[in-house]
Amino acid sequence: MGAQSDTESKRPPKRPGAGQLPSRDRQIAGFLFCLPGIVLLVSMLLGPFLLAFGLSFTNLRLGSPLPVRFIGIENFHAILTSESFWQALGNNLYFTAVVVPVQTGFALALAILVNQPLRGVLAFRSIYFMPVVVVMTVAATVWLILFNPERGLVNAFLRLISGGHLESMWLRAPESAMPAIMIMSIWQGVGFQMIIILAALQGIPKELYEQAEIDGAVAGQRFLYVTLPQLRNTLIFVATVTMILAFRLFDQVWVTTRGGPLGATRTMMIEMVELGFERQMISRGSAVAVIFFIIVVAITILQRSLIREEK
Amino acid sequence: MADSSAQVSGSATAARSSDQDAKVELRRTTGLSKRVRRGPGWPMYLLLGVIALFFLVPLVFMVVGAFKPDHLVLAEGNTIRAFWPTQASFDNFVSAFVRARFGRLFLNSVIISTFTVGIGLIVNSMFGYGLSRLPFRGSGVVLLGVIALTIIPLESVAVPLLWVMSQVGLRDTYTVQILPFIANPLFIYLFYTFFLPIPKDLEDAARVDGAGTVRTFFQIAMPISKPAYATVAILSYMFIWGQLLWPVLVTAGPDVRPLPLGLSVLIHQPPISWGDVMAFAFMMTLPLLILFIVFQRWFVHSVARSGIKG
């Protein structure tokens, strides 16, 4: 996803034997090597993608005997005037607004912590990463019990540290359901970003820190003037990828609340599954998919324009 | 042959860098720890430990719960005994197999992920190899197309693909869960960049020895590219094993249902026995967890690489 313009500029003396193409036989061989993948990409990705656009302007339903007709922008109109869609989009934005900065910041903090020259620090790195290999459905299932208002560990802990004052209905109340979803999402996903940031952190030339130290920079200054600028592209990458993930939010919600209570955790993907699958309205589900894709493209353009090429 | 492939791994920078990165990374962390500054001391460990608890508590809770009688999972959920396997037994595991058909669902997931990852490795690497080593008229355009396709998320094609699949009668099969995920633009691109720097001499040598294009690929390119294969295998296995949205759309009964969907069905079908649920969740996590513990370095490396190539 982050590769587009990199390749443009980096795509080097791109092929061995620069310039001229190899013999006819080898060209045919090359094409045949690509063929299975081309067929699959066209039939499983590009085709359905174009179909999504096409179908979103029709009235196609799954298993409906009615003839398919072109109905213009009716699907988009129906979606964009429906309250549940705006509620879903709002929830996605709420999730994005909280999770993107918090998770990116947390991942950065973890990466810095496990990058210290301490004995046993690798063990901590492994522990922080472990939830990533626990798939989201499992994570959501366990947190569902932990968030149980009466019997859950989360409330028990809150009551303990607050002397019995703090507690929440978590997934059962509209105002606290989304925060609960956010917490389990961060728990499961932050390790992934920690590793990406850690790799970037270890790629920062040590001379920069030595130079900064000579110049008399204290730890905080070294972080501000060396670490952060050096991590700029990585952090933008991580933040924008998290942003896209936030709009794909589905698994956690499907497992725990199915969009409730009162639509408080409804997301675009829940909306799409409900329309396209449960109500069999393929065309309207496709229209949601198209809107979702436009958002993804917008985020990707944002990403590309923010990431500076290092030359 | 052994000689020449050693030479390759010496000069094929990508092949090497991936392996080396991991080593450098290790050296850095361990190496540095020798010139320890005694600085941070126990407060730092306290901080690291508290954070570790945040990540570990839900996991320990799950494992302990898997061994507890059903009613105690919730009943003891808010006490310190949540971490103690009271009246421990394997009942939940037996029940997960008998009542929730864990065996069948596990088999389904294994079949789906094995075929997807296995066929995917071959198809995607051949694609990448064709584009980088055997350019043909129009391959540049194909490459650009592949790069452009990386932006399309599964979610935006799921609904129309669901319609196509039901038109051709593939719903509720293994095939429908495998086919869409074999070819992956990102992995093709990863292989493309990986194969690019292999020295041409090596292939030429193989050709002089009488190896055809296909043999050169399988006997020269593939073996020296193990790091790329490992990276792609780990990333795609992690993704396939946890997949939920697509199975929700295309499977109906439990016959081809994969584990994540099985779990989500289990916790929405009363009466819910939380002991079984925990046993189910724990067993479903084990394969990836074991792989992670054994191949830790590779997991970390693959994830780091996914960030670079996006």
Image (cartoon, grey):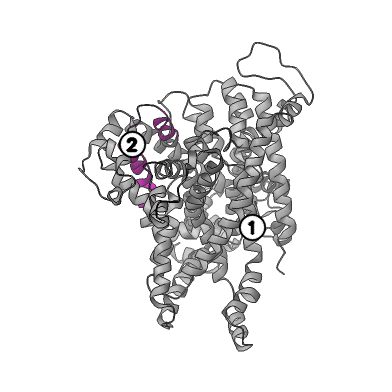
Q: Residue A286: x percent and y percent? A: 67, 29
| Mark 2 to mark 1 CA distance (whole Å) | 39 Å
Residue type (three-letter) at the residue carrying disc 2: Trp
Identify the residue at horizontal 52%, vertical 38% (top origin). A173
Identify the residue at horizontal 45%, vertical 47% (top origin). A167
Mark 2 or 1, closer to the camera: 2
Magenta span: B261-290
Q: Residue B47: x percent and y percent? A: 43, 67
Q: Give me the disc on residue A237.
A: 1
- Chain of the residue under the numbered disc 1 shown in the image: A
Helix, strand or loop for disc 2: helix
Tell me the quadrant of the picture where the C terminus of chain B can be found.
Answer: bottom right
Indicate the quadrant where residue B111 lies.
top left
- The crowd level at tag 1 (other Cα within 10 Å; few <14, some 14-19, many 20+) is many
Instruction: Kindly identify which residue carries mark 2.
Output: B274
Going by the image, does B252 lie left or right of A259? left
